[in-house]
Each structure stands twice: as structure tokens, then as C-alpha cells.
Amino acid sequence: MLFSPSSKADASAFREHELGKIQRFRQVHSGFLSFCKNMKQEPCQAEQYFLRRNFTVDRRVFARPYDANPDYFTNGDWILTQWLGNERYECFLNKEVKE
């Protein structure tokens, strides 16, 4: 079961905490996110983020169990996945406030 706050104050605090985590993620990965939004303007960075030959072992920490084979994931995969998930989660959190 997901966290279910017992009061409006708890729900608001939880929502703000989660939105803060999303904002921190955006700040930490702003370079990559900017690249994704402007890919046509910065095509040379695609090699850094998505070619397997540029995979760095230090990024393995962020790999999920289904990403365990380095032949099938790259440095940018997990960031892209997290970004897309955060976008949907943020919409959900904002929708909950309106209801």
C-alpha cells in the first residue's frame, strides 16, 4: 500500500516533499534534461549519453535489475526513465491537490 496521509496537513507535507525530490532531480540532471529537450540543437551530445561504448562503470550504481546487462543500457537510460516517471508523478500530485 502506498503512503496514505491521515490529515490534510500530512498530505500537504508529503506532496511538498515529493515535489522537492522531483525539483532536486531536475537540478542535478539539468544538463541531460536540457539536451533531451533540445536534441536537434545539440546532436553531438547524444554520443555521450546513448552510445554503449561511452558507458561508464560509475553509472552502474543507478542501473535497475532489468538493466544489469551493460550490452543493453547506456549512461542516459536511467535518467530518461526517471525523468519520464517524475513528469507523470508530478501530474498525479498536482491533480490530487485540485480534487
Image (cartoon, rainbow, N blue to C red):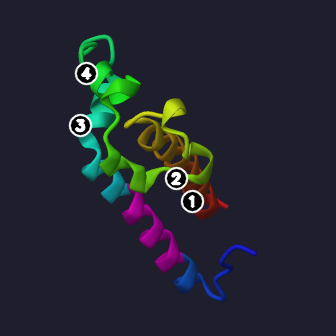
Question: As shown in the figure, which amino acid type bears the numbered disc 4?
Answer: Gln
Occupied quadrant, residue 92: bottom right
Q: Are marks 4 and 2 in contact (CB under 8 Å)?
A: no
Q: Disc 1 on helix, strand or loop? A: helix
Q: Residue 7: x, y in percent? A: 62, 87
Distance from disc 3 to disc 1, alpha carbons, whole Å, reads 25 Å
Q: Disc 2 on helix, strand or loop? A: helix
Q: Horizontal placement of 97 versus 63: left or right?
A: right
Residue beneath disc 2: 90
| Tag nearer the camera, 4 or 2 | 4
| Residue segment shown in magenta | 12-22
- Which residue does the image show at 34% across and 46% down from the upper left? 57
**Looking at the image, is mark 3 or mark 2 earlier in the sequence?**
3
Is 24 placed above or below 79 here?
A: below
Q: Residue 3: x, y in percent? A: 65, 78
> Any magenta on residue 25?
no
